[in-house]
Image (cartoon, rainbow, N blue to C red):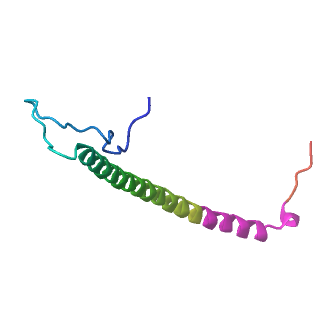
C-alpha cells in the first residue's frame, strides 16, 4: 500500500449541514444558493490545496534534477580525465611478452 505524501483537502465538496443539532435550520431562505456557495468555496479551497501539492512536487523534482546535474558534472570531469589518459597512451611503447 503506498504511503500518502500529500493530501488535497477538502475531500467532500458539498457536504454541509443545513440544520443544527436541535433540528433548527441554520439557513432560513435560499438554501440551494447557500449549498452552491459552500460547494464553490470548497472547490476553490480544493484547487488551492492542489496548487500547493503541485508546487511541492515541482520543488522536489527540481531538487532531484539539481542533484542529477551535479552528478553529471562530476562524471563529465572523470570522463575528461580518462579521455586525456587515452590520448596520451601510445600502444607502441607497451612491451608485449612472448608466450612460453
Residue at (61, 61) in percent of width and height:
75
Q: Above or below — where is 62 with respect to 30?
A: below
Q: Which residue lies furthest to the left in this view?
A: 22
Number of marks in picture: 0
Q: Above or below — where is 68 with respect to 8?
A: below
Q: Nearer the viewer, residue 71 or 100?
A: 71
Left or right: residue 83 versus residue 59 is right
What percent of the width, then of the height, locates residue 60?
43, 55
Q: Quadrant of residue 4?
A: top left
* Residue 57 included in the magenta stretch of the image: no
Residue at (45, 57) in percent of width and height:
58
Q: In which quarter of the image is residue 19?
A: top left
Left or right: residue 28 versus residue 44 is left
Q: Nearer the viewer, residue 41 or 97?
A: 41
What percent of the width, then of the height, locates residue 68?
54, 58
Q: In which quarter of the image is residue 20?
A: top left
What percent of the width, then of the height, locates residue 79?
67, 64
Quarter of the rendering occupied by the N terminus? top left
What percent of the width, then of the height, locates residue 17?
20, 36
Q: What stretch is highlighted in magenta?
A: 75-94
Left or right: residue 64 versus residue 84 is left
Q: Nearer the viewer, residue 53 or 30?
A: 30
Q: Residue furthest front?
A: 29
Q: Magenta part mainly helix, strand or loop? A: helix
* Residue 86 included in the magenta stretch of the image: yes
Q: Nearer the viewer, residue 9 or 53?
A: 9
Left or right: residue 24 versus residue 42 is left
Quarter of the rendering occupied by the C terminus? top right
Residue at (67, 68) in percent of width and height:
80
Amino acid at each position: 500500500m503506498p504511503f500518502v505524501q500529500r493530501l488535497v483537502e477538502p475531500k467532500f465538496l458539498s457536504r454541509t449541514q443545513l440544520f443544527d443539532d436541535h433540528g433548527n435550520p441554520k439557513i432560513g431562505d435560499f438554501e440551494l444558493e447557500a449549498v452552491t456557495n459552500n460547494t464553490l468555496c470548497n472547490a476553490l479551497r480544493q484547487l488551492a490545496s492542489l496548487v500547493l501539492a503541485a508546487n511541492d512536487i515541482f520543488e522536489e523534482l527540481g531538487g532531484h534534477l539539481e542533484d542529477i546535474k551535479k552528478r553529471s558534472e562530476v562524471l563529465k570531469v572523470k570522463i575528461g580525465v580518462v579521455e586525456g589518459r587515452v590520448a596520451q597512451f601510445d600502444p607502441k611503447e607497451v612491451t608485449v611478452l612472448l608466450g612460453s
